[in-house]
């Protein structure tokens, strides 16, 4: 009787551990599959036909159709540079330097990957339209109310989780495998300014 | 004896958890009901170029679509022969990607890397061959690229990144001139 209880217990714990660890490594990534730079995370082999099973599972679940890393790189941030989750209750300042690529863009989503309704229909800023300073640096305000320079509206609700995506098309620097290189210091910082 | 039994169960638990982990990771891609292929298949038939409406709140074919990129796609099916994808590349920024149904991007090229504006991609399955006159011939006005697909069913996607909101209309116009259909030798 006791061994049966042990066996059922063992199986239940194994099921939780197995599914839980698989879920975590597919959703959140691990050092095997993702590069983390400050608040930004990028799946190294996303879209690549020779990607590992974790990356392929992540891709299937995401519902996306990303370009392989030789022509595009994608970086996702769900937290600010201090590690606090991005939320529409707070205002953020994104500060960055130009990226050596043909085209790049910073877009704002909710945590389902949907764009956020706003009257000015502004959902992203890209390298061509961004207002930047004489030295090439740029500042983007993520806020509910209008802000000067580049303003990414975070919508009317104050309880929305936010996700930022930096997509970089045709990076000009590549490694020996042709994978686009984006130096760590080219990824913008995300500073939380104030919260409601 | 009372100590030995739990130790054995812990080993069993770890081995079992490892197996469940591997099975879960390997079966998940096949079980994910709403991958990109499923989302795009709902929008129209195969072997036809379909332009996606500009991504906006509540109007996104896929999650995390770029609001400042215009997309057109063709779900290709090579069962009855190769497929021809024709495009006039309106901008160096354009990106043409070919995918398997699972989303593996097996071919990608940027507009800037193509020699000519008018381009034809002939997508060929592993067991198919095409004898295309004019491939690599400098006299023709079109660039013809034969791409070997590892799968018979997949997705071709053209991305037109915008230089600003004012360019959207022109990108839409340019994407409308792209086409996708069965390959015929006369072309």
Image: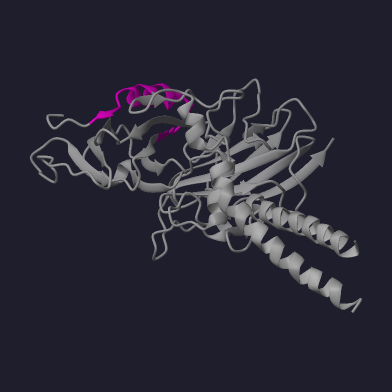
Q: Is residue B159 left or right of residue A185?
A: left
Work out whether residue B117 can be spotted: no
Q: Is residue A141 visible?
A: yes
Q: Nearer the viewer, residue B118 or B166?
A: B118
Which of the pair B17/B163 is nearer the observer?
B17
Residue A43, compared with residue A175, is above or below; it is above
User: Quick check: A92 left or right of B104?
Assistant: right
Quadrant housing residue A115: top right
* Rendered location of residue B153, percent (x, y): 37, 38
Relative height, residue B15 to residue A170 (above, below) = below
Position of the N terminus of chain A by quadrant: bottom right
Answer above or below: position of A152 versus A191: above
Asked if the stretch drawn in magenta spans residue B163, the answer is: yes
**Residue at the spot x=62%, y=63% of the render?**
A31
* Residue nearest the observer in this picture, B28 or B3: B3
How many numbered badges does the structure rendering display?
A: 0
Q: Which residues are magenta?
A: B159-182
Residue at the spot 29% in from the left edge and 34% down from the top edge: B89
The quarter of the picture where residue A107 lies is top right
Image position, residue B67 (x, y; %): 53, 31
Q: Position of residue A167 (x, y in %)?
A: 52, 44
The C terminus of chain A - image quarter: top right
Position of residue A91 measured from the top left corner of the image (x, y, whole percent): 75, 38
The verdict on residue B1 being magenta is no
Please report the residue visible at 46 percent of the width from the left and 23 percent of the height from the top: B43
The residue positioned farthest toward the left in the image shown:
B139
């Amino acid at each position: 009787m006791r061994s049966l209880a042990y066996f059922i217990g063992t199986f239940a714990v194994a099921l939780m551990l197995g599914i839980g660890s698989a879920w975590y490594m597919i959703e959140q990534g691990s050092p095997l599959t993702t590069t983390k730079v400050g608040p930004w995370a990028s799946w190294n082999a996303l879209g690549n036909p020779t990607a590992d099973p974790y990356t392929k599972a992540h891709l299937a679940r995401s519902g996306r159709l990303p370009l392989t890393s030789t022509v595009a790189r994608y970086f996702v941030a769900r937290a600010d540079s201090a590690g606090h989750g991005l939320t529409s209750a707070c205002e953020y300042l994104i500060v960055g330097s130009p990226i050596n690529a043909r085209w790049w863009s910073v877009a704002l989503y909710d945590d389902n990957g949907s764009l956020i309704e706003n009257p000015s229909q502004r959902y992203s800023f890209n390298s061509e339209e961004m207002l930047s300073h004489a030295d090439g640096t740029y500042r983007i305000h993520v806020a509910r109310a209008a802000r000067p320079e580049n303003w990414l509206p975070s919508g009317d609700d104050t309880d929305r989780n936010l996700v930022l995506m930096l997509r970089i098309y045709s990076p000009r620097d590549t490694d020996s495998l042709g994978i686009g290189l984006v130096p760590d210091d080219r990824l913008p910082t995300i500073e939380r300014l104030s919260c409601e | 004896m009372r100590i030995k039994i739990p130790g054995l169960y812990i080993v069993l638990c770890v081995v079992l958890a490892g197996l469940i982990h591997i099975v879960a990771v390997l079966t998940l891609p096949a079980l994910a009901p709403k991958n990109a292929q499923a989302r795009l298949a709902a929008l129209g038939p195969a072997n036809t170029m379909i332009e996606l409406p500009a991504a906006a709140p509540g109007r996104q074919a896929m999650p995390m679509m770029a609001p400042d990129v215009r997309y057109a796609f063709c779900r290709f099916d090579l069962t009855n022969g190769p497929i021809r994808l024709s495009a006039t590349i309106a901008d160096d920024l354009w990106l043409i990607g070919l995918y398997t149904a699972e989303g593996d991007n097996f071919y990608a090229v940027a507009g800037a890397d193509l020699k000519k504006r008018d381009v034809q991609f002939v997508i060929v399955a592993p067991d198919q061959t095409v004898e295309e006159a004019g491939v690599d011939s400098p006299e023709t006005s079109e660039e013809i690229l034969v791409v070997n697909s590892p799968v018979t069913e997949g997705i071709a996607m053209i991305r037109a990144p915008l230089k600003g909101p004012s360019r959207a209309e022109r990108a839409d116009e340019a994407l409308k001139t792209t086409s996708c259909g069965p390959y015929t030798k006369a072309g």
